Amino acid sequence: MKEFTFKTGGAHPEENKLTKDSPFVPLAPPAIAVIPLSQHIGAPNIPIIKVGDHVKIGQIIGSANAFVSAPVHATISGEVVAIELRPFPLGTKVQSVIIKNDFKEEWVSDLKGIESLESSSKEDLIKNIRDKGIVGMGGATFPTAVKLSPPKDKVIDVIVANGAECEPYLTTDYRVMMEYPEKIIKGLLVEMKITGAKHGIIAIETNKKDAAVLLEENVKKRELDNIEVVLVKTKYPQGGEKQIIKAVLRKEVPAEKLPLEVGVIVQNVGTLKAISEAVFEGKPLIERGVTVSGSAIKRPGNYTIRIGTTVTDIIQQTGGLTKKLRKLIFGGPMMGIAQPTIEVPVTKGTSGILFFGEEVLEMAPQDEMPCIRCSRCVDWCPTGLMPLLIDHAWRREAIKLTETLNATDCIECGVCSYVCPSKRHLTENVRNAKQKILKQRKIEAAKQAAFEKIKALKEKKAQEAKEKLDEGEKVNG
Amino acid sequence: MDENFVDLIVTSSPHIRDKAKVSLIMRGVLIALMPATIAGLYFFGIGHTLGVIIVSILSAIVAEYLSCLIFRKKATVYDLSAAATGLLLALTLPPSSPYWMVAVGAFVAIILGKWIFGGIGSNPFNPALVGRAFLMISWPTYMTIWVKPFTQSVFPPTNAITTATPLNIIKLKGFSELLTMFDGSRLIMYKSLFLGNVAGSIGETSALLLLIGGIALIAKKIIDWRIPAGFIGTVFILSAVFNRDPIFSILSGGLFLGAFFMATDYSSSPITIKGRLWYGISLGVLTVIFRQFGASPEGVMFSILIMNCFVPFFDKMLPRVYGHFAPKREG
């Protein structure tokens, strides 16, 4: 197997993949499910059920007409008891449907998959993916159907199945690869058929070589010579979309553009499994594999969890906590989001839930020391940015300068903060700068639009006035 | 979940940090300097030489502590950066330096070299070299007394035999004169220079031991190889161009000490990868020019202090950003 990597920067934090050898165990459906109505990037969904309704598993409970959206399904059967704002893993509150479980496990009846890939049209496949609510499950939650419908003028050559899973602790993708290799390949074939991509590449980090071997065996068994399994070096952030493209294809996605600009779509292996289930089995995205790990949880492991199951439920079902819980992270330790409450539910984008005790104070010291200009952040940045300069600029509110220093190209991987010997909050401040710039650009665009409108209006008025004057002159003349 | 309650802290990602700490980096530098320090004690006698080193380090620590008080900053003595500056200063001083002068040098290094600019990370010049330059200008006679190895063994150093450094001899009498001191053999001369059995400041003479420390720092990723490689490589090539013995040129004087331990000082060296290589090369050019045309035989110290001024320029050599295909120049 060939081995690749990206060259610029990157770090290798302790892997801590404690749950590597724990197969997926299904968690019992929760008594109360809290299902956020919008779990994707794009237009928010509107509830299409009301309080008091009885819903079945797989029934659509929220959808939107907008192109960039993905419907949400009921994940347990029972009664809708409320539709209200509830905590969401992104740190916000979103409209959520609260369902009380009747424990009958009733499914909607009309779920069925396609007969065969050959007999299905591209449109059918996309519709299936869309209707089943599939989004990117690596954490970005971009609607997959939209990702697979690039503009007409863009040709997709390659689909890269991303099995790098470079975040420490997380083993969800690894387990999916070990337990469902055939589904990953089927999902990849579906995407290749939809996009017309001639090649599929499955990229897996060297610390998961057994998964790569397994997938290669499956590819060989099916005699697929258009799919290749490759290894990528164990280095963070190897699983970043831009880094994995650079590593395996030696191509760079132009700034502020999508991978399809260079003819590539990158898809997380977990998403490919979900696509396979949606297309061939008609199964909507109602549950997902989640790594539950960290020092403060009694039984770490990989669990198949219904979407809408809250952390409170997960703690109870996995045997409780081992110590006082000080940090709850959704996602990995490098890019994950610390939660303010244990009432947050598992969503489509939840790849891992990490529980830590008092030791977090040591794991991520928050007291900053002066920058010593060691430039570790520069040497380790996978994007080629100058995190310390952007940080300096942000602190003295020189937003324009952060823009010149390309703060908007930051992928927020966290490496700069990770390597900083002075424990400065570099990632946080670069992210702040990036968000501020993007917000300003939005405002600027809106201003420009308004200005154009006013200008057009003024011109029209001037034109009218002139015409009037002309007429007046005519009359006078 | 009764006794195990929940008290969540919310912080921004990442939620794990590398073990790297300022004090660990400085400790690394101190350890890497140990071989050269021990060589200094071996060649120039434990008595007075050890005193110089201890006075320098202690004065630097006291100066750091007082600065923290005066400038009302959190005490930064524990980050070991002052200790590193103190040791570095000592290693650049003649083995027979009077203690009071060493103490003045250390105070100047820490206060004038570092704290008036705002403390660690803010100094535009290498603090140890600021201290040394101050002493060089204030007490030139003390700063040019060079002890012959193995003659300064007692305390105080009254009976030490003074001599000139190899670079001094070249400047005053020429290369052939120097060679006669080593029985006319280049090989013996190289060996003496490589091991450090020549006159010079406490820590500069043994190229071998400085090299070991420097390579350790590079391997530990504490310093970037580009600065010493650019510096030493350029001195080697350019010396040959000026018809100076290239091997002699890189082994003599304070080049290895300067290239591995002084020019790589974080706050006074470039933060960009490309900039560091060019910085090293520029230092090499300047050093050879000083040695060839300058009034004083050695040029490493003033080369570094002068190039320190140009660091903001090297900091503009930004790396190419992913997805940007023409390098952007503004910074």
Image: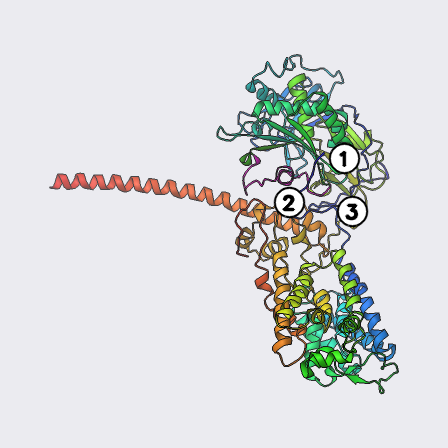
Kindly indicate the quadrant of the structure image that contains residue A4. Answer: top right
Q: Which residue is mark 3?
A: A360
Q: Position of residue A309 (x, y in %)?
A: 73, 28
Kindly indicate the quadrant of the structure image that contains residue A455. Answer: top left
* Marks 1 and 3 in Cβ contact (< 8 Å): no
Main SS of residues in magenta: loop
Tell me the amino acid under the disc marked 2.
Answer: Glu
Q: How many marks?
A: 3
A74 relative to A451, above or below: above
- Disc 3 or disc 2, which is closer to the eye? 2
Q: Which residue is mark 1?
A: A208
| Chain holding disc 1 | A
Span highlighted in magenta in the image: A234-259
Disc 1 is placed on an element classified as helix
Q: Verify whether residue B37 appears in magenta.
A: no
Q: Which residue is mark 2?
A: A412
Tell me the amino acid under the disc marked 1.
Answer: Lys
Q: Position of residue A344 (x, y in %)?
A: 71, 34
